[in-house]
Image (spheres, rainbow, N blue to C red):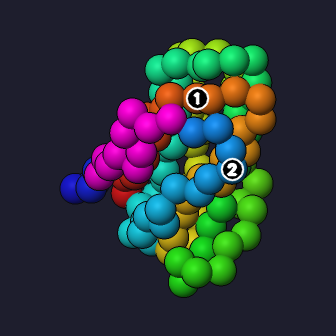
Amino acid sequence: MKQFNAAHLEIKKSFSEYFETHPYEVGWADEVIFFIFVEQVVGEGTLDARVEISHDGIHWAYEGTSFETISEEGLYFVKVTHFGNYIRLAVDIEGAEFKLQVQIASKG
């Protein structure tokens, strides 16, 4: 039987600069989907998010998967199928404030 887990990493928070989500342990999973729901954009700017992986939750490497540049409200996602034991998003924001919800769904 497959397992499934979904978690909120950030809920209705506003960001205007670089941040990283908390590490999430997914070593058991076959795939992970990150969702970014942009509730509001104040100003004109961009959000760039990339997936990072780690073997220990301390040292991080860019995995190779990125969201397309986000500049408006809506729901966005990326699917990741290869990763270490831990995974997170690193997010760069420039020129605006983004009110976000960030979620992760993993299954295996």
Q: Is residue 87 magenta?
A: no
- Horizontal and vertical percent position of residue 107: 37, 52
- Badge 1 marks a residue whose secondary structure is strand
Find out whether the residues at labels 1 and 2 contact each other: C-beta distance under 8 Å.
no
Residue 98: mark in rendering:
1
- Using the rendered image of the protein, determine whether residue 82 is visible from the camera's viewpoint: no
Pointer 1 local density, CA inside 10 Å: few below 14, some 14–19, many at least 20: many
| Amino acid at the residue labelled 2 | Tyr
> Which residue appears at 61% of the width and 19% of the height?
42
Residue 44 in picture, x, y percent from top left: 75, 17
Q: Nearer the viewer, residue 104 or 73?
A: 73
Residue beneath the point at 71% across and 38% down: 93
The residue tagged with tag 2: helix, strand or loop?
loop
Residue 68: which disc?
Answer: none
Question: Which amino acid lies under the numbered mark 1 shown in the image of this protein?
Answer: Phe
| Quadrant location, the C terminus | bottom left
Provide the residue span drawn in magenta.
5-14
| Label 2 Cα neighbours within 10 Å, binned few <14 / some 14-19 / many ≥20 | few
Name the chief secondary structure element in magenta.
strand
Q: Residue shown at 42%/45% (left/top)?
A: 10
| Residue 90 at x, y percent in the picture | 65, 54
Q: Quadrant of the N terminus?
A: bottom left
- Alpha carbon separation for disc pair 1 and 2: 11 Å
Q: Which quadrant of the view contains residue 54?
A: bottom right
Residue 50 drawn at (x, y percent) = 70, 49
Query: Which residue was labeled with disc 2?
Result: 18
Q: Is residue 94 visible?
A: yes
Locate residue 28: give its quadrant: bottom left
The residue that appears at 42% across and 69% down in the rendered structure is: 25
Q: Is residue 41 above or below residue 3?
A: above
Front residue of 97 and 20: 97
